[in-house]
Amino acid sequence: MPFIDTIEKVDWDSVTHDIYSRTPSDVERALCNAGSGNIQDFMALVSPAAAPYLEQMAQLSHGLTQKRFGKTMQLYIPLYLSNACCNSCAYCGFSHKNQLKRRTLSFDQILEEAHAIKRTGFEHLLLVTGEYPKEAGFEYLLKAVELLRPHFSQISIEVQPMGAQEYAALSANGLNTVYVYQETYNRETYPTYHPTGPKGDYAYRLETPERIGKAQVHRVGLGVLLGLEDWRVDSTYLAMHLRYLQKNYWKTKYSVAFPRLRPHTGNFQPNFPVSDRELIQLITAYRIFDENVELALSTRESVRFRNNAYKLGITSMSAGSKTEPGGYANERKDLEQFHISDGRTPQEVADYLRNDGYEPVWKDWDKVLQ
């Protein structure tokens, strides 16, 4: 049964009521059941009733992360290939309705960016585009992966959804990970955020991780855009989605990211702002829910927040990010998707981690060892 059939039986308002009805005893039981993967326990951990237990959650999450991942932190960097987009997402600077200069990198420009990035030490590269297949579709991405594969040990993409055969072809040519965020699982409000363009197809986007799993891509990255809808409810749906995928596509690894809305071209404001304390609650809830899932934190977050949050469950972080095409070789702020918050250089992030007793990891295990 596809996941969409599963969640169509789960009413958003009912899930909301279940979460907000949780009691302190439910939270205490969830803490005792750490690692159970029980959705009811996850609801308790993200509920308002869990707020007084945040210190206990943080300590437990830290311990579980240390046990499973040690004092290591994977470092990655996004390479924006194109800001062209045919969607009109209300919350995104790349929306085709925004008066933004558009640019799609040529293959020579991609290599220029790659050389600039390599000088910083990165081996993990995340390729990002808007959704505009005419300029940055499958063939373009396939060529980009082939071009960059000799230079980086791990290549990931965050682009428009594709078919299983296309993901399989990309994987065969060196792709390691696909990130695809549902943005919100609230089907009723989803169209208000995606009024035009292919991203408005809720079902096709929701089924994308299943197509990735069928293609046997090594890793799938999941997430919701924090600020669109009630983070407690959206994250519960995401936890359900994660469990479904782990059960049905068990050969694939999974990660969860925590993107909070950031200032961008346009005037959209968060409907449900997420405080720093609430984001910590969410990160630790995922770790207690699943001690093996990888958790990522990007430069959307501030230096202060990242320096305090990463030890509480995070396993990978971006550093030195530019959110515009060509931003590493030639910075162009007028092309960026959103403004980053942590503007430290990769070396500054790595030095901070080392000084705190952590090992920054620029390169993951070679595929031959997997």
Image (tube, rainbow, N blue to C red):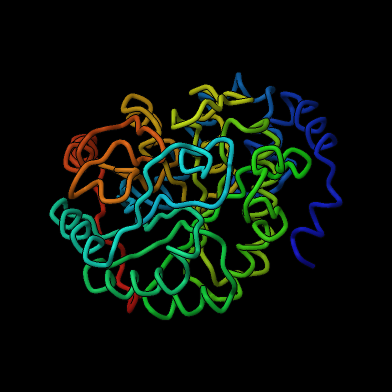
The quarter of the image holding the N terminus is bottom right
Q: Residue at x 40, y 36 (%)?
A: 338
Q: How many marks?
A: 0
Q: Is residue 292 visible?
A: no
In this view, the residue in front, 146 or 72, is 146
- Percent coordinates x, y for residue 302 in the rendering: 35, 27
Residue 87 locus on image (x, y percent): 57, 49
Q: Is residue 358 left or right of residue 299?
A: left
Identified at 23% across, 74% down, the residue is: 150
Residue depicted at x 76% and y 26%: 20
Q: Is residue 210 left or right of residue 324?
A: right
Q: Quick one: quadrant of the C terminus?
A: bottom left
Residue shown at 16%/50% (left/top)? 120
User: Where does the image place residue 187, in percent across and percent down from the top left?
Assistant: 76, 45
Q: Residue furthest left?
A: 119
Q: Nearer the viewer, residue 66 or 363?
A: 363
